[in-house]
């Protein structure tokens, strides 16, 4: 007996493959990720090594500094790829944290309903009224500013609110479905229903929103690093590299253009991929 959900996912994959912009965007994301993971091994320079004889040189092949060096003589190629690594790690892990909290919160609130739903969503409303930037700054400052683990936890801890609302709306529409009522009639517990029936049926919107959340998290981290509140020296993220490049923009424009180009590419590709996934997973397209 065939599984209807399997047919849905196969059809969704076919629709996604027909979305050229999403396919190209996904390929570019994979390419940039592989370059960030393995590219530094091609260079003889470390991300924190100082070349005293080649400080602030323009892109070229001088001493294998293919993208030039910063004012301290550190290789921009390696530092930019390390920045991509850190920005992607923070974006992905912060999104994972926000999804775990948001999906659990929204699914429980939407399925249980009643006073519990009202209380849980009032908590979301209160947190929505608070400025995210100050919450993240306070958390990252209290627990260890610049620590990458603390940073993605702090960003993810305030990024789950929209996901909670999305999942709650989906859970409310699922509460009265026949398979939920059948599970209740057979004595399945509430936690089991939420985990086995509600959560799997909101996977589509969750995947789409997660894809669109990753660039938001990357941009948020870049903004914090640009302000000097994110990743600290000697490590670098795209935001901190852009901050350094902005200070040298007039005399060494490549220090700004190179990390900015990688950041714009990642943000654009994730948004195109998210649009493609949204269209592919839209039930109206079946």
Image: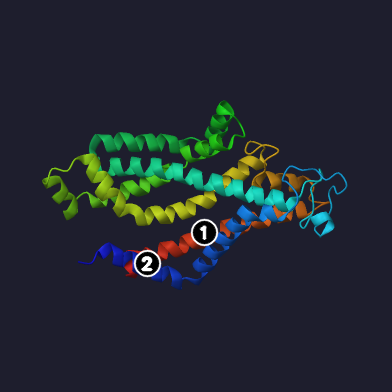
The answer to whether 141 is drawn above or below residue 179 in the figure is above
Quadrant that contains the N terminus: bottom left
Q: Is there a contact, CB below 8 Å, between mark 1 and mark 2? A: no
Question: Dot 2 surroundings within 10 Å: few (below 14), some, or many (20 or more)?
Answer: many
**Badge 1 density bin: few <14, some 14–19, many ≥20, Cα 10 Å:** many
In the displayed structure, 280 sits above or below 82; it is below
Residue 278: percent from left, percent from top = 41, 62
Q: Nearer the viewer, residue 57 or 273?
A: 57
Name the residue nearer the viewer: 180 or 79.
Answer: 79
Q: Quadrant of the C terminus?
A: bottom left
Q: Secondary structure at mark 2?
A: helix
Residue 195 percent location from the top left of the image: 28, 45
Q: Earlier in the sequence, mark 1 or mark 2?
A: 2
Q: CA distance from mark 1 to mark 2?
A: 18 Å
State the mark number for residue 204. Answer: none
Residue 11 picture location, percent across and down? 35, 69
- The answer to which quarter of the image holds residue 225 is top right
Residue shown at the point (53%, 49%) measured from the top left: 216
- The disc placed on residue 271 is 1
The residue tagged 2 is 12
Name the side, left or right, on which 36 lies relative to 150.
right
Q: Is residue 198 left or right of residue 137?
A: left
Residue positioned most to the top: 142
Can residue 158 be seen here? no
Q: Is residue 230 left or right of residue 44?
A: left
Q: Nearer the viewer, residue 54 or 219?
A: 54
| Colour pattern of the rendering | rainbow
Q: Nearer the viewer, residue 67 or 210?
A: 67
For image coordinates 40% across by 42% down, the residue present is 100
Which residue appears at 48% of the width and 54% of the height? 212
Q: Which residue is painted at 40% across and 38% down in the image?
A: 125
């Amino acid at each position: 007996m065939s599984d209807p959900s399997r047919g849905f996912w196969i059809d969704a994959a076919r629709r996604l493959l027909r979305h050229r912009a999403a396919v190209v965007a996904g390929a570019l994301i994979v390419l940039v990720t592989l370059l960030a993971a393995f590219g530094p091994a091609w260079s003889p320079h470390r991300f924190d090594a100082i070349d005293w004889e080649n400080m602030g040189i323009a892109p070229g092949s001088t001493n294998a500094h293919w993208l030039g060096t910063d004012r301290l003589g550190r290789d921009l190629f390696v530092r930019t790829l390390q920045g991509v690594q850190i920005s992607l790690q923070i974006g992905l892990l912060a999104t994972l944290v926000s999804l775990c909290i948001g999906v659990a919160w929204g699914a429980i609130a939407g399925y249980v309903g009643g006073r519990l739903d009202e209380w849980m969503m009032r908590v979301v409303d209160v947190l929505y009224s608070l400025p995210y930037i100050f919450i993240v700054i306070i958390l990252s400052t209290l627990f260890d500013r610049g620590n990458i683990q603390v940073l993605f936890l702090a960003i993810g801890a305030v990024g789950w609110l929209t996901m909670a609302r999305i999942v709650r709306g989906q859970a409310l529409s699922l509460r009265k479905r026949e398979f939920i009522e059948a599970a209740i009639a057979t004595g399945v517990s509430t936690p089991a229903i939420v985990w086995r029936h509600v959560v799997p049926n909101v996977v589509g919107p969750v995947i789409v929103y997660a894809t669109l959340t990753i660039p938001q998290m990357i941009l948020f981290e870049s903004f914090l690093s640009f302000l000097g509140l994110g990743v600290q020296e000697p490590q670098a993220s795209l935001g901190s590299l852009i901050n350094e490049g902005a200070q040298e923009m007039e005399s060494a424009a490549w220090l700004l253009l190179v990390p900015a180009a990688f950041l714009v590419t990642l943000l654009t590709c994730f948004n195109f991929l998210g649009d493609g996934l949204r269209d592919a997973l839209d039930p109206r397209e079946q």
